[in-house]
Amino acid sequence: MLDLKFVRSNLDSVKNMIKNRAYELDLQRFEELDRERREKLSVLEELRHQRNQVSDEIAAMKKKGEKVSVNLNEMKEASINIKKKEKEIAQFIKDLNQLLMVIPNMPHESVPVGSDEKDNKVIRQWGEIRNMDFKPLPHSEIGEKLNILDFARATKIAGARFSILQGMGARIERALINFMLDIHTIEHGYTEILPPFMVNSASMTGTGQLPKFKEDLFKIEGWDYYMIPTAEVPVTNIHREEILKEEELPIRYVSYTPCFRSEAGSYGKDTRGLIRQHQFNKVELVKFTRPEESYEELEKLTQNAEEILRRLNLPYRVVSLCTGDIGFSSAKTYDLEVWLPGQNCYREISSCSNFNDFQARRAGIRFKRKKGKGTEFVNTLNGSGLAVGRTLVAILENYQQPDGSVIIPEALRPYVGGVDLISA
RNA sequence: GGAGAGAUGGCCGAGUCGGCUGAAGGCGCUCGCCUGCUAAGCGAGUAUGGGGGGAAACCUCUAUCAUGGGUUCGAAUCCCAUUCUCUCCGCCA
């Protein structure tokens, strides 16, 4: 959420931002609500002031043992009046907050302006696309032929958009998780977190999934619990309503979790294979930084995610999302897109974002400077490092052989007991 | 699931019969002094949101002692509900 005062005093740039994001929101109501709230508030505070003064007088009289020469009936009425006004204002504040909650973040000045993914900017490319003198198969076919992926039975036991990994499929998935966690903890200095996979609504609100994106979430019936759509939610909320010390920053966490998404609104998209599932595994990087270092940390975080693809020798490119394609809470996002021969295109495998203080303000994550008064909001960042299922997809498709077998990337072999080839 | 105890500032912790208690005391932290270094010592300061004023340092009002309601002229203090934590019993991966 943006700062109320910032919105108030930068209304034009906020409106412009909403336009650039190709977003629909009328700020007319904001201006009205904000103005009325302030007017009513000062009336209320004056009334409270009067009441407090009289109460103090009563206290003083009683202390001195004097008779109380105040009309208590009048005071009672005044008090009732105050309560009435308090309720009115509470409603205004609630409305104003609700509106503030659905205003997206201000994109960084370096973010390309554009309406949709066509206007995203390719920043760099890495790796060489393998020249295949045969027709590359999509991963779903490769996997089914090798008997390591089973979609039909997954549909039976759960439904569409679920999958079963078996044998080497399951083993590679597990190996990838360990591989990624090892690199990020040992080499990149992140602290490993294994959080709850369900969280309460306060956490979902803190990171911005609620109230706006409720329909994307799975909720536990009868409980205030939601299945996490990404580790970002529990991990960022670790420090919700906390005041951190400046010297603790930056904090770097890495967390493996399954992720659960309803994929409402994507019917018919990526129906085959592992690309779009209700449940998938992901290793997530999360950072808490000081404001002045967050963009530098975004670059580092992105490179940390890229490192996984390089070790696995998977060709990819880095894309800076434009204003129309960037996420609601994000100020700047790099997508990592891996080459998939089976689809003959690049597909997102990681999304690395700087949220500035947008999440921190919602979640109340602050820090205190060593020098200087008061507290400031930290900046939060996160990025996939990487989406595990899609990494498996990329390996199957990029390392497939004409005979249907799949070579295991060298870097991964120590994690699968030295096996170097999957064949039927 | 049954019985009980509790939730106060960055942390620990006090709040008596409701009335200058935004909140004692301690720790931590910041600034200054002192000591030829370190440690110790001395002095001052040190919550957050919101409204108004000021160019600013800052001043002022208001709210906040888990959350929400209630009683009262007035509540951290009394009542009710909720949430969470802890102890004991039961159950259990």
Image (tube, coloured by chain):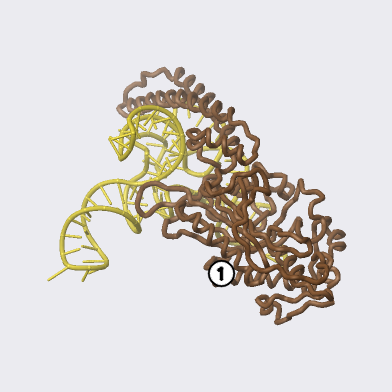
Chain colours: A brown, B yellow
**Going 80% across and 59% down the picture, which residue do you hit?**
A162
Nearest to the observer: residue A220 or residue A325: A325
**Going 82% across and 77% down the picture, which residue do you hit?**
A423
Q: Disc 1 residue type? A: Thr
Task: Describe residue B55's horizontal placement relative to residue A227 as left or right.
Answer: left
Residue A307 locus on image (x, y percent): 60, 68
Residue A63 vs A22, above or below: the answer is above
Picture quadrant where residue A52 is located: top left
Residue A308 locus on image (x, y percent): 62, 68
Q: Chain letter of disc 1? A: A
Nearest to the observer: residue A19 or residue A27: A19
Picture quadrant where residue A90 is located: top right
Mark 1 is surrounded, within 10 Å at the Cα level, by few (under 14), some (14 to 19) or many (20 or more) other residues, namely some
Residue A244 vs A64, above or below: the answer is below
Which residue is under mark 1?
A: A185
Q: From where the camera sits, is residue A130 visible? A: yes
Task: Describe residue A70's horizontal placement relative to residue A225 as left or right.
Answer: left
Picture quadrant where residue A210 is located: top right
Image quarter where the C terminus of chain A lies is bottom right
**What kind of element bears circle 1?**
helix
**Going 42% across and 59% down the picture, which residue do you hit?**
A247
